[in-house]
Image (cartoon, helix red, strand yellow):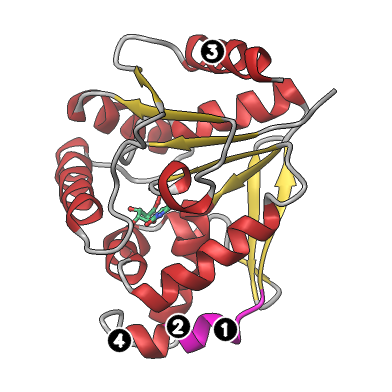
Amino acid sequence: MKKINIAIDGPAGAGKSTVSRKVASELGYIYIDTGAMYRALAWKAIHSNVDIQDGQVLSSMLESTNLQLTYAIDGNRIFVDDNEVTDDIRSSEVTASVSAVSAHAGVREKMVKKQQDLASSKGAVLDGRDIGTTVLPQAELKVFLTASVEERAKRRHFENVEKGRSSDLQMIMNDIQLRDDKDSTRKISPLIKAEDAVEIDTTSLSADEVAESICSLALERI
Ligand code: C5P
């Protein structure tokens, strides 16, 4: 069967990763969490005491970093220079720094290249902010997921609680608004819906319902 690439973009907490994993598993595709790649670089910057405002240093650090993603049924596992950072990249410290790290042109250029390489054989679901506009502008299916800020914050909060992480709903809401603002207003590849993307408001939908709709759209294109 013909394989396609699926681009899933949207703001923080819109359910992109849960839905992308489900779609990938249903279609037998690989799933690439591009946010995790930016988080991994932010993690390394913090641990190497690198200034997250210094795009040149970050970009050369990325060049010399062995950044690996492996595919597991419950999502990607992420390795930085052979250290697993899958859980560590979800810390509040990384979350607070990642939008600054991802705003640098040199960083984005290298990350986009890596992401395009990972998707080059087709049969991939990528989620992020600029997949439909910049990483895979030729993707056969582009989806833009949205949900109200309140709903997105609640989902993050319950996910944290479920995983035994400490969590404060109001702080999550503030963080989401701040990140949306930074990601949407940055100069390079800001978070915007690609013109040809299908927009799905997930506020009152379950992850299974959203994944089902995306799979139907994908099957129309295969
Ligand atoms: O998807 P997630 O919330 O983990 O992404 C973390 C951050 O990485 C985003 O807030 C954004 O700054 C950055 N990002 C990006 N482009 C992508 C994916 C994520 O700039 N394709």
Q: Nearer the viewer, residue 147 or 89?
A: 147
N-terminal-most mark, 3 or 2: 2
Question: Which residue is under mark 4?
Answer: 54
Q: Inspect the image, locate mark 4, and give the three-letter code of the amino acid beneath it.
A: Asp
Question: How far apart in space, not on screen, are marks 4 and 2 (Cα)?
Answer: 9 Å
Q: Nearer the viewer, mark 1 or mark 3?
A: 1
Contact (Cβ within 8 Å) of mark 2 with mark 1: yes
Residue 208: numbered disc: 3
Image position of 146 with respect to 30: above or below: above
- Dominant secondary-structure state across the stretch colored magenta: helix
Question: Which residue is under mark 2?
Answer: 59
Asked which secondary structure carries label 1, the reply is helix
Image position of 187 with respect to 137: above or below: below
Question: Which residue is under mark 1?
Answer: 63
Q: Residues within 10 Å of mark 2 (few under 14, many from 20)?
A: many
Q: Inspect the image, locate mark 3, and give the three-letter code of the amino acid beneath it.
A: Asp
Q: Look at the image and tell me whether residue 118 can be seen.
A: yes
Asked whether, in this view, residue 184 is left or right of residue 38, the answer is: left
Asked which secondary structure carries label 3, the reply is helix
Contact (Cβ within 8 Å) of mark 3 with mark 2: no
Task: Indicate the position of residue 111 as horizontal and vertical percent values.
Answer: 52, 66
